[in-house]
Image: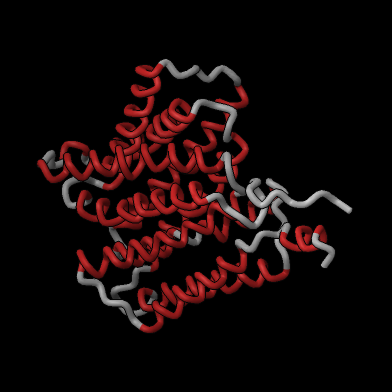
Amino acid sequence: MSEPVDTDAPGTDRVPISVALGAIVVMFLWAVCFPLISVGLADSPPMAFAALRAALSGGVLIAAAEWLGRPAIADRSQWGSLVLVGLTATSLGFFGMFYGGARVSPGLATVIANTQPLIAAVLAWGFLNEHLSALQRWGLAGGFGGIVLIGAPGLSGTDSQLLGIVFILIAALGIAVSNVALKRLAGRVDILRGMGWQLLIGAVPLAVLAATIEDIGSINWSGRFVVVLAVLSVLGTSAAFVLWFALLRRSRLSQLNVFTFLTPIFGLIMGVVFFAEQLHALELAGIGLSLLGICAVSRPPRMAAGAQTRGE
């Protein structure tokens, strides 16, 4: 008989309470991002805003690492991984968020962005050996079906939000790829330096794009914009990235990523409260179907193995 499964270990069916609470905090911080982006875009072109966000966030973390004397990153393979994370999580992620945020309502944008766990589940199966059961595969199909229902009201008529949805899906793909890379990198680099450098690396393509296609001089450095940029950078980005990277050391990606679906709940509440959005029956049905799908996908694949250790 095999040894009993340690239910507190990463990869089993029990996520430590501290990890769950940390994940909830991260999801709330990320939910705040879309309303802040929507407000800030009134004062800045999207790519300039995105580049400023990434550069300020990365600079804060590197400054903190220097002040605390955190160890430098010397391994070339680690730098390669950080470049990949920077180009996917920050460059692609912010590109999609900021362009999509200007074309999609904040609540809907938050929901569409959370196709990321579905994409990440497929990537985790291929690159992290996190196998999917039949139930999890059906969950993926159901989750994508829910996203189609959620996006359906914005796909018809002259006020279609299709382009914005495409941009946000690009962001979701970038973040999903980066999550796999971050999972492999977790525990190998200093958290502050790793997240700081990937943000600064990711800021470079955004800054180049902004300088090429936008009028950077049109940024309105109002008090509102400065506050939005600071909160978005320090709380919604620096703090959230550091905490998320720390949590990846303690849980499977597929288990941890399920908490991402708390973000639509926070985001839609903000949309209703601050932007007077209304939720239609089709959107509510899609949200429910997506949540059910993710619940199925996140079911720990080692549960069956655990049952065998009990003689079932």
Q: Is residue 210 visible?
A: no
Q: Nearest the camera: 155 or 273?
A: 273
Q: Quadrant of residue 62?
A: top left
Residue sitting at x 31%, y 57%: 101
Residue sitting at x 57%, y 35%: 186
Q: Is residue 162 visible?
A: yes
Q: Quadrant of residue 65?
A: top left
How many numbered dots are placed on residues in this image? 0
Q: Nearest the camera: 178 or 218?
A: 178
Above/below status of 269 relative to 282: above
Q: Nearest the camera: 30 or 217?
A: 30
Identity of the residue furthest to the bottom in this view: 281
Residue 158, given in percent of the width and then of the height, sits at 29, 76
Residue sitting at x 34%, y 81%: 280
Identity of the residue furthest to the right in this view: 1
Above/below status of 248 relative to 60: below
Residue 202, given in percent of the width and then of the height, sits at 42, 35
Residue 92, given in percent of the width and then of the height, sits at 45, 45
Residue 111, given in percent of the width and then of the height, sits at 41, 64
Q: How is the image coloured?
A: secondary structure
Residue sitting at x 47%, y 43%: 244
Q: Quadrant of the C terminus?
A: bottom right
Above/below status of 141 relative to 234: below
Identity of the residue furthest to the left in this view: 222
Q: Quadrant of residue 118?
A: bottom right
Above/below status of 51 relative to 176: above
